[in-house]
Image: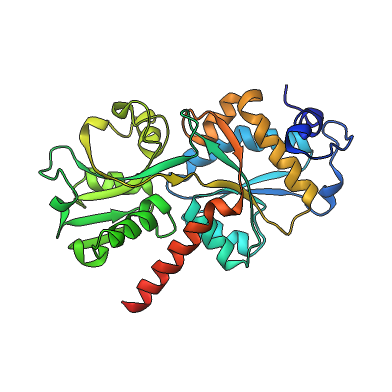
Amino acid sequence: MLTRRTILAGTAGTLGLAAPALAQCTPPAWARAVPQIRIGLLGGENEADRIARYEGFRKLVEDIFGVPTRIFAAGDYAGVMQGFAARQIEIAGLGPSAYAGIWMDTNGNIEPLVVTEEQDGSIGYFAVMYVRADSPFRTLEDLRGRSLAYADPNSASGYLVPRAELREAGLDPDRFFGRTGLAGGHEQAVIAVLQRQYDAGVTWTSGIGDESQGFTRGNLRAMVEKGMLNMSDLRIVWRSRQIANGPIAARKDLPQAFRDDFRRLLMALPTEHPAIFRQIERGNPRGYQLATHELYAPFVAMRQAEAAARRLR
């Protein structure tokens, strides 16, 4: 069973960290500086589902560390980013673009702890552009002059990466499409396309496994599992290069011992509490790997390029 003692002792050798001798459920020394743990949840999914998915994790964290743990479910990605900047959130699972934005906005006051490892051993996913299956659109070129729904301006797959790769291909995303808009989240963008409000949308997927089930992980898989989507109603017409999975990250101004303990908890989670792990990861990945800032440096560069392009407009 995953307990505070196993978190501190069982995985310390793997991480090369000393394991302090603390009793299970006794608040650790760092609790004086971190009297509560606030976990930020990105938008893209309706709030009730997000909170329900994370309740088991919230309770586990609270039970193991003996520190009150709360969920902060922001309406969009920007809410979590602002919460980090205002020091109102300690931990969050982030997309790579949101991580890069926080790193830029806080002068580096964020540390990636772990990154999700997929079933094939990779630590990446894909942005995909989709249309209704009964539409005439079969390629990206078919969408020239048509309408596109972005998920969120701080999403890598739902905004940043598609725009960056279109520019690399010599296409101006603001001119290639006849109309673009922000749907307010990944689920909302899919629904907008299904309801014919937009011709196409962009979202994220692991890109591995059974496409008819929404692949192994991602927004499409989550919507299929919730009965919100039948994959036969959509057609994927474009796929990005592989994108680094976003990290679970902590504020860097928090005690090192807190960050080390939380990293140990996360590394043990897939084997000790697989049901909770699958809930917070929205699918069935293999586990976690340790993460570093270098993995996300390209997204800092992409956000800087996007800002420069915006100034030119």
Q: Is residue 235 left or right of residue 163?
A: left
Q: Residue 6: x, y in percent? A: 78, 28
The residue lying furthest to the left in this view is 136
Q: Is residue 44 left or right of residue 79?
A: left
Above or below 51: residue 169: below
Q: Is residue 307 left or right of residue 272?
A: left
State the residue in front, 285 or 135: 285
Displayed quadrant of residue 307: bottom left
The residue shown at (65%, 36%) is 266
Q: Quadrant of residue 26?
A: top right
Give the quarter of the figure containing the C terminus.
Answer: bottom left
The percent coordinates of residue 71 (x first, y second) are 61, 46
In the picture as drawn, the residue positioned furthest to the top comes out as: 1
Nearest the eye: 115 or 253: 115
Residue drawn 33% across the image and 27% down it = 213
Query: Residue 201's x, y, as percent?
Result: 27, 49
Which quadrant does the N terminus fall into?
Answer: top right
With 67 as the anchor, is 193 left or right in this view? Answer: left
Residue 168 in which image quadrant: bottom left
Q: How is the image coloured?
A: rainbow
Residue in the picture at 54% in, 50% down: 295
**Residue occupying the point 42% across, 41% down:** 125
Depth check: 103 or 23 in front?
Answer: 103
Number of numbered discs: 0
Q: Residue furthest bottom?
A: 312
